[in-house]
């Protein structure tokens, strides 16, 4: 019958899943109407096998409304069609091999029917259910004979743009009813495996073409038509040539799209850096529209591919998703064992020490928390082993240790890994508890607090006897301490001196600084910057009959830690009034204008407790705000203070928004000399409405009022807020939210 083109149809989606299908008896055949019927015969002298002929004609023509073929005599057959388009195709002789006439929104699938009621394993049931799911094309005749299983296979054309039907209610003539469930699947093992026709080859390729090429592109149809027309081979060869050509076209298209998006983003960044004008704003809007169009196209394309893969590979618990996940997991393990490469952590840095990249070797051997545990054991290894991988280090230990030591080694590794998992996944930090010394010993716990602004530290010392009773405690202030290690060593010296003053002879000094304790316990001469402190501490320790230096975790040094931090108020060091100087209450430079060359066109010079230490506990601070022409201090809030603003130069449009549920906007135009108050915690703003610079001063009712800029906090948080949250909260398109997050 010559080369043909497959015509697919769009199944009606009007029928709901809750509507019933009334089943008729198998022999209840309606009256035949001979409209849309043709009588024909085959131009061949060989015998025509009627069943094979019906199957071949149906597969080649693919009529939209179906076709029925019956014998009229020795060589004549009655062809009855059920749709006008099919009649026009047959009578008009429009059969051709032009793929541009083939809709590619439909794909043929096998659908497995579950829980088919007894008495419903009939051909007309299969046809009705097939037309409900899509367009019925075929049913598995051998599967009907296995009706006792309650399953039936049918094949139909499914529209990939519509959701897959899940169930359908069947009602028998007797009044009984039940639900049939649909499940796309692979062909049954006993399904017929006839020779593949050219039309079937074409349909299979077009299905693959639909799932692998962005057919929403304007140039896709022209490309397919050109590749198809240029090939003079037979149908399989033309399909192969088309596949190769589309593959190259798709790669070039992806490269051009990436280049286009990159160019648009680069142009948008350049526009943001230019002075604001109507032309610039218009061009910015145009570039944003082009970016949104490209993003929408890519999103629609990936949704189409996702839908096709879902139909082909079933639901999420399938081979496709398992294979994809397993591949990602293998890639993560291949390059690194940390959680960042497996996409379950925001940063590759170790969450415990926050210093080095996390790995198995680091978590168990190199991390400072792990090293604290190993230092309490008798396991030692050379510094060269730190370059070994975890596996090589593990093998080295087993090669050089006894079996008993190896068992202890495994126990320590399990304990360290358990503590690490508790911290990472549950946020629990396992700490040692403070305990009194054994026998006549006296325990000294020391800790320090450090203020980096004034370079001062406070040492806290606690002395207890073997019963846990407090023998004494003290707080000592240290000035001009430039190094954190120096303050740690200085605290040890002060703790030993305090124990000497109490008359203690047998002491144990505990400290949570592993570096200082290691140097004190070492017999080697210390050549670091702490050498003077270490030498002095060792000299004082000789005054005791017995003096031991022991490392303890932070959990075993809680009392001394809290005692040292007791002199800090509002997180700032409370200086002795006798040591106060004029510079503690002085700040110069508010006469100098700030740099307003930025996106918002404003600059805030803050004078709070960080600049003037004497402001601590006084509950007051000051800021100078400079505005460029048409610049603004964007909407923000001060969580810990009320603001009173006075305009010195220029004209400002100011306002604040009341709290929920009223959310009332209160605004005012301010001129030089005008004053305006912004209540604590409310969102407020200032905008320079003049074409000249403006200056304002503001006082706040807190030494550290804090500031939260709304846009920066919402769209520039670290890590960023999930775009789905912001999309729903602001009622914006997800692409707009993502773009705003990229700006901030």
Image (cartoon, helix red, strand yellow):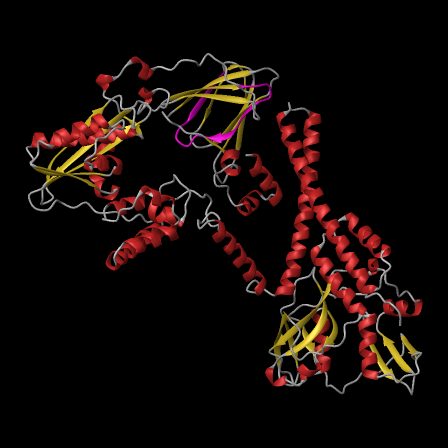
Viewed as shown, does residue 369 lie left or right of 347?
left
Q: Quadrant of the C terminus?
A: top right
Viewed as shown, does residue 390 lie left or right of 474?
right
Indicate the position of residue 347 as horizontal and vertical percent values.
45, 43
Viewed as shown, does residue 408 lie left or right of 657?
left
Asked if residue 443 can be seen in this view, the reply is: yes
Viewed as shown, does residue 293 lie left or right of 704?
right
Q: Residue at x 70, y 30 (%)?
A: 282
Q: Nearer the viewer, residue 347 or 334?
A: 334
Asked if residue 66 can be seen in this view, the reply is: no
Q: Residue at x 36, y 23 (%)?
A: 610
Q: Which residues are magenta?
A: 627-647
Indicate the position of residue 189 as horizontal and vertical percent values.
65, 77
Indicate the position of residue 659 as horizontal and vertical percent values.
47, 36
Q: Quadrant of residue 483?
A: top left
Q: Residue at x 64, y 28 (%)?
A: 270
């Amino acid at each position: 019958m010559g080369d043909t083109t497959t015509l697919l149809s769009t199944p009606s989606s009007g029928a709901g899943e809750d509507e019933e299908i009334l089943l008729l008896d198998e022999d209840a055949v309606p009256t035949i109407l001979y409209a849309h019927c043709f009588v024909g015969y085959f131009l061949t002298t060989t015998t025509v096998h009627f069943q094979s002929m019906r199957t071949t004609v149906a597969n080649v023509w693919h009529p939209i409304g179906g076709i029925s073929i019956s014998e009229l005599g020795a060589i004549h057959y009655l062809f009855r069609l059920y749709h006008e388009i099919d009649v026009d195709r047959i009578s008009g002789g429009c059969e051709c091999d032009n793929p541009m006439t083939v809709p590619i929104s439909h794909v043929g699938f096998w659908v497995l029917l579950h829980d088919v009621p007894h008495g419903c394993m009939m051909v007309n049931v299969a046809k009705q259910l097939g037309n409900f799911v899509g367009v019925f094309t075929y049913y598995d005749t051998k599967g009907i004979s296995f009706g006792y299983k309650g399953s039936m296979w049918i094949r139909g054309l499914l529209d990939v743009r519509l959701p897959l039907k899940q169930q359908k209610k069947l009602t028998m003539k007797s009044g009984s009813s039940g639900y049939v469930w649909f499940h796309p699947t692979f062909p049954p093992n006993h399904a017929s495996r006839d020779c593949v026709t050219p039309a079937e080859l074409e349909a299979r390729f077009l299905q693959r073409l639909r799932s692998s090429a962005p057919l929403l592109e304007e140039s896709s149809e022209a490309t397919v038509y050109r590749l198809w027309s240029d090939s003079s081979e037979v149908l399989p060869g033309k399909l192969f040539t088309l596949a190769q050509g589309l593959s190259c076209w798709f790669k070039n298209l992806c490269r051009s799209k990436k280049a286009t998006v990159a160019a648009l983003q680069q142009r948008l960044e350049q526009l943001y850096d230019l002075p604001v004008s109507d032309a610039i704003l218009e061009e910015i809007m145009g570039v944003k529209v082009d970016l949104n169009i490209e993003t929408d196209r890519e999103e629609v394309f990936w949704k189409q591919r996702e839908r096709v893969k879902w139909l082909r590979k079933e639901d999420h618990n399938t081979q496709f998703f398992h294979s994809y996940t397993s591949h990602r997991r293998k890639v993560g393990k291949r390059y690194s064992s940390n959680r960042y490469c497996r996409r379950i952590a925001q940063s590759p840095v170790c969450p415990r020490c926050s210093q080095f990249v996390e790995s198995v070797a680091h978590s168990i051997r190199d991390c400072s928390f792990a090293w604290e545990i190993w230092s309490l054991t008798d396991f030692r290894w050379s510094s060269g082993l730190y370059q070994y991988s975890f596996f090589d280090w593990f093998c080295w230990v087993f090669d050089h240790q006894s079996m008993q030591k190896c068992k202890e080694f495994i126990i320590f590794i399990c304990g360290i890994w358990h503590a690490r998992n508790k911290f990472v996944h549950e946020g629990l930090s396992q700490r040692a508890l403070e305990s009194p010394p054994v026998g006549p010993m006296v325990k000294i716990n020391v800790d320090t607090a450090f203020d980096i602004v004034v370079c001062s530290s406070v040492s806290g010392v606690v002395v207890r006897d073997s019963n846990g009773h407090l023998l004494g405690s003290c707080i000592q202030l240290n000035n001009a301490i430039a190094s954190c290690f120096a303050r740690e060593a200085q605290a040890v010296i002060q703790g030993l001196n305090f124990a000497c003053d109490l008359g203690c002879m047998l002491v144990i000094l505990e400290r949570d600084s592993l570096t200082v304790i290691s140097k004190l316990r070492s017999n080697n001469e210390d050549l670091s910057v702490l050498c003077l402190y270490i030498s002095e501490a060792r000299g004082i320790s000789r005054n005791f009959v017995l003096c031991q230096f022991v490392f303890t975790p932070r959990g075993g040094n809680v009392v001394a830690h809290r005692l040292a931090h007791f002199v800090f108020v509002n997180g700032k060091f409370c200086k002795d009034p006798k040591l106060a100087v004029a510079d503690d209450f002085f700040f110069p430079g508010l006469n100098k204008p700030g740099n307003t060359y930025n996106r918002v066109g404003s600059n805030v010079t803050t004078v709070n407790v960080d600049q003037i230490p004497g402001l601590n506990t006084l509950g007051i601070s000051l800021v100078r705000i400079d505005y460029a022409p048409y610049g603004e201090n964007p909407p923000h809030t001060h969580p810990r203070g009320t603001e009173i603003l006075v305009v010195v130069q220029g004209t400002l449009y100011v306002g604040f928004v009341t709290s929920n549920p009223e959310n009332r906007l209160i605004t005012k135009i301010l001129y030089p000399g005008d004053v305006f108050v912004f209540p604590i915690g409310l969102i407020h703003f200032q905008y320079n409405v003049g074409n000249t610079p403006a200056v304002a001063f503001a006082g706040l009712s807190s030494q550290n009022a804090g500031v939260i800029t709304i846009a920066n906090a919402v769209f520039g948080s670290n890590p960023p807020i999930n775009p789905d949250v912001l999309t729903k909260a602001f009622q914006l398109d997800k692409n707009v939210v993502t773009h705003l997050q990229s700006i901030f």
